[in-house]
Amino acid sequence: MSDPISIIIWIVLGFVAGLIAKFLMPGRQGGGFILTTILGILGAILGGFIAEKTGLVTVVPGTFQIWSVVSAVVGALIILIIFGAIFGRKR
């Protein structure tokens, strides 16, 4: 993943995963474009790691798999839950 195209693809996938996770997550989450992208990228990494370690997904560089997107969204949801628990609004 050292070429610029792969990095751009990971950023876009992370942003899309972050948007989908924010849409699926109940309640209102703060953060704008940059925070959504960062949380989504972290979620994509986490989701991909979990999916590959459990044998659900085999990562093949240079190919697109729908399971990569699903695992990225699941990872982004996990990251959003953790982020909300740490930085959530205090009432």
Image (cartoon, rainbow, N blue to C red):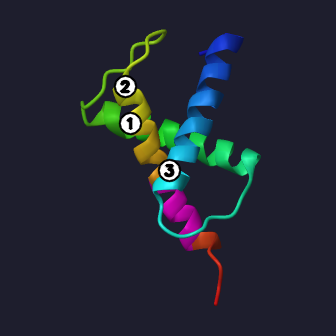
The crowding category of the residue bearing disc 1, from other C-alpha atoms within 10 Å (few below 14, some 14 to 19, many at least 20), is some
The crowding category of the residue bearing disc 2, from other C-alpha atoms within 10 Å (few below 14, some 14 to 19, many at least 20), is few
Instruction: Report which residue position mark 3 lands on.
Output: 21
Q: CA distance from mark 1 to mark 2?
A: 6 Å
The crowding category of the residue bearing disc 3, from other C-alpha atoms within 10 Å (few below 14, some 14 to 19, many at least 20), is many
Q: Quick one: SS at disc 3?
A: helix
Amino acid type, mark 1:
Val
- Percent across and percent down for residue 49 are 41, 36
Q: Is 78 displayed left or right of 37 in the figure? A: left
Query: What is the chief secondary structure element of the magenta stretch?
Result: helix
Amino acid type, mark 2:
Ile
Q: Are marks 1 and 2 in contact (CB under 8 Å)?
A: yes
Find residue 54 and name its label: none
- Mark 3 or mark 2, which is nearer the start of the sequence? 3
Q: Quadrant of the N terminus?
A: top right
Magenta residue check for 70:
no
- Which residue is located at x 26 percent, y 37 percent? 54
Residue 15, visible in the rendered structure: yes
Instruction: Report which residue position mark 1 lands on.
Output: 70
Residue, far front = 23
Residue 2, visible in the rendered structure: no
Magenta residues? Answer: 78-85
Q: Are marks 2 and 3 in contact (CB under 8 Å)?
A: no
Q: CA distance from mark 1 to mark 3?
A: 10 Å
Q: Is residue 77 above or below residue 13?
A: below
- Which residue is located at x 58 percent, y 63 percent? 83
- Percent across and percent down for residue 13 are 56, 30
Find residue 66 and name its label: 2
Q: Is 68 displayed left or right of 6 in the figure? A: left
Amino acid type, mark 3:
Ala
- Percent across and percent down for residue 25 are 48, 60
